[in-house]
Amino acid sequence: MTSKAPLLSRTVVILLISMIAANIGGNMFGPLMPLYVQQLGADIEQIGLFFTLGMIAPLLFQILGGWLSDAIGRVQAMAIGSIAGLAGYIVFTVAPSWGWLLLGMVGLSMASSFVGPSFQALVAEESTEETRGRVFGMVQTAFLIVGVIGGPLGGFLADKWGFRWMFAVAAVLYAIATVIRLSMARKLRQQATAPTPAPSFKHLKASLATIAGLIVGGGVITWIFLSDGVSDVSFSMIGNLIPLYFNNIIGISKTQLGILFSVASLATMLLTTLGGALSDRAGERVGIVLGNLLIGGGILLMLNVTAYPLLIVAWALFGMGQALTGPAYNSLISKVVPNKLRGTAFGFFSTSLGIVSLPSPYIGTWLWQRFSPRTPFYVPLVAMTLMLPVIWVKFKLPKPGPSAETPSSPPVEPAAFQPEGASPD
């Protein structure tokens, strides 16, 4: 009797450990970054400008990072990105003014662009199509410990000793992750039996042309692209305003803010495996629609209460929604994109959507000042309501026929996440 292979391979487990170490640091400062920019002298409008400018750097690296992952290997790309990410953390720790933080954002953007698509593609490669939702669910469940630990730890360190000590601790954790990734890349390179072809512009051009063809082909990937575009634009308006809303308007402390994000991560962690199983059994669109309804409910509750216990409930709803949508999206994308193009596809998606949503943080701060602090938060609610019927109708995969393609070859129908922090690095 042969024993069944474990769902998570040894390579995925080791790199998942590095992701956890890196992203505890990322979750320490992620919810507090707008407050750090504010502390270094920026006003509300300048904060919007900062995060708008900060979105430019990822646009320069995302396609390159995804393509390089396809060309030289997943772990090798992760190792290169990690070195840039560590440099970014060091800049954050010593920055004398908020303008210097943009330099640190370049390093972290390169890390996110190289590490995130590579790890997602690696997880897909190390799983079967039948178990992919569960595997992504297990990976995200383990990964989400970073939010449970990172948010409260970052808030406590910032309240107790200040932002610079918080970033110093985060830099040490990221250095540990970098060492793990470099060691793994070196080991895999030594074990390689065949030479890796050198990356070329011709290969990059061909990959981008194929992805572009899939996106305009009118299949599932087209609708993923359109719905993600609407979501990215609307949620980019509010992502960096949430800490300011809680701290400046409602009046909760940095520690309480960190606890809220921890609650969301805990709720996601407890339910993500269930979300992956739901994706495998009922189809990806079920989890995506239900998850978005929960996220919308969380935002709506947040805007209409001020009591801290009710804010905890709102953030728990948000976390539950993430638990359902995350594995479903990852599973769906991995099924509609050829294996050899997954890294490029993640980078292409992120870059094209990022260009569209580039002005969103500034528009969000303009709505905050022109109308009220609550106004920007209603934009994603309206957008989500309009897109849910589209998702339900269009996010349905065709049933495989007798001549169905294998997962490693181009999908029959032209068709298309991110771990390191809200943006995996």
Image: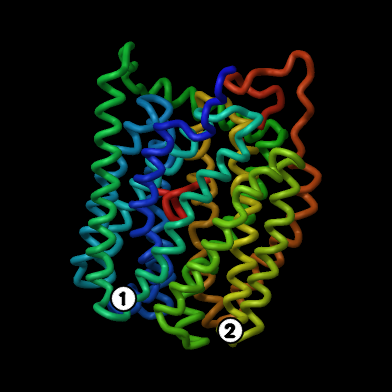
**Which label lies toward us, 1 or 2?**
1
Q: Nearer the viewer, residue 244 or 164?
A: 164
Residue 37 is left or right of residue 393, and the answer is left
Amino acid type assigned to the residue bearing label 2 in the image? Ser
Q: How far apart are labels 1 and 2 at the CA level? A: 28 Å
Q: Which residue is mark 2?
A: 372
Residue 103 seen by the camera? no
Which color mode does the image show? rainbow
Residue for point 29% across, 31% down: 185
Q: Is residue 31 above or below residue 88?
A: below
Q: Position of residue 413 (x, y in %)?
A: 71, 26
Mark nearer the N terminus (1 vs 2): 1
Q: Position of residue 160 (x, y in %)?
A: 28, 80
Residue for point 28% across, 23% down: 189
Q: Quadrant of residue 75?
A: top left
**Numbered mark located on residue 158 in the image:** 1
Q: Which structural element holds mark 1?
A: helix
Residue for point 47% across, 85% down: 252
Q: Is residue 339 above or below residue 395?
A: above
Q: Nearer the viewer, residue 24 or 111?
A: 24
